């Protein structure tokens, strides 16, 4: 499904070439040179942006079409990203390996899959490192401007607190905003930002 969606878009980027606004805003707070794992990285807009800021980025994504587009974007921007084609549910996740783990719009995950993904994400960050997650709240289903039509895939502030009770939450905010990230994400959207630190 994802591969077809990226292929059907041709040369166009389904979620745009510019970084997501949450990534752009949080990037200024990342330590210089911090290593980043970007999961379900899509067409590379976030990984390429972070690499352009000097971060070594490991981007994992299961759509080869998306990765090909991401490689093209990285080449055009003159940056290096370590792209890896893998299914996150079958991937051998590194542990305590990155300064930062980033997940933007990974709401393909069912509640049961989310438990696994969130645990792997938190474990991938080294002690003292940061976990950044950006997604939708259940109100997004009514907007229909992006994401699956499944409220149970979405996040709430209490859910994020419960899922990451072992982390120090630095920012957790649900809000609404007009977004224009390409045809895949366009219009008023119900969003949630999450930034947390793994205890040292
Ligand atoms: C909504 S897109 C977001 C892409 C990117 N994070 C962004 O913000 O531009 C979701 C991405 O997750 C990828 N994806 C879905 N299931 C996956 C899985 N099991 N393993 C790896 N990537 C997956 C899709 O191919 C797609 O690129």
Image (cartoon, rainbow, N blue to C red):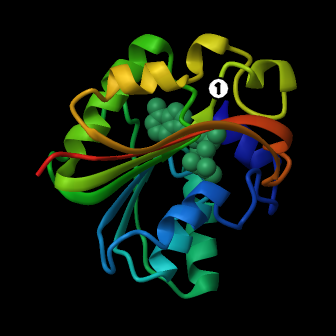
Residue 177 rendering spot, x and y as whole percentages: 79, 44
Residue 163 rendering spot, x and y as whole percentages: 34, 23
In depth, the one of 158 and 97 nearer the eye is 158
Residue 121 vs 18, above or below: the answer is: above
Residue 121 vs residue 195: left or right? left
Residue 167 rendering spot, x and y as whole percentages: 25, 37
Image quadrant in which you'd find residue 142: top right
Image quadrant containing the N terminus: top right
Q: Is residue 195 visible?
A: yes
The residue tagged with tag 1: helix, strand or loop?
Answer: loop
Q: Residue at x 43, y 69 (%)?
A: 29
State the residue position of label 1.
Answer: 137
Residue 155 rendering spot, x and y as whole percentages: 55, 24
Residue 99 vs residue 196: left or right? left
Residue 135 vs residue 124: left or right? right
Q: Residue at x 64, y 83 (%)?
A: 76
Q: Is residue 92 visible?
A: no
Quarter holding ligand 1: top right
Image quadrant in which you'd find residue 43: bottom right
In depth, the one of 87 and 171 nearer the eye is 171
CB at disc 1 and ligand 1 closer than 8 Å: no
Question: Which class describes the residues within 10 Å of circle 1: few (<14), some (14-19), or many (20+)?
Answer: many
């Amino acid at each position: 499904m994802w591969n077809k969606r990226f292929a059907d878009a041709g040369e166009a980027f389904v979620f745009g070439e510019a970084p997501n606004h949450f990534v752009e805003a949080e990037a200024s707070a990342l330590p210089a040179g911090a290593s980043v794992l970007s999961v379900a990285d899509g067409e590379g807009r976030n990984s390429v942006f972070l690499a352009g800021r000097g971060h070594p980025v490991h981007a994992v994504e299961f759509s080869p079409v998306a990765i090909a587009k991401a490689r093209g974007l990285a080449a055009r921007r003159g940056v290096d990203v370590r792209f890896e084609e893998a299914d996150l549910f079958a991937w051998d996740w590194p542990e305590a390996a990155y300064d930062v783990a980033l997940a933007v719009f990974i709401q393909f995950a069912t509640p049961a899959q989310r438990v696994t993904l969130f645990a792997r994400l938190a474990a991938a960050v080294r002690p003292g490192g940061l976990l950044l997650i950006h997604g939708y709240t259940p109100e997004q289903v009514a907007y229909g401007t992006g994401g699956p039509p499944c409220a149970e895939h979405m996040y709430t502030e209490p859910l994020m607190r419960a899922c990451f009770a072992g982390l120090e939450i630095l920012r957790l905010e649900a809000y609404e905003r007009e977004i224009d990230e390409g045809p895949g994400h366009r219009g008023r959207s119900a969003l949630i930002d999450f930034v947390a630190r793994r205890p040292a």
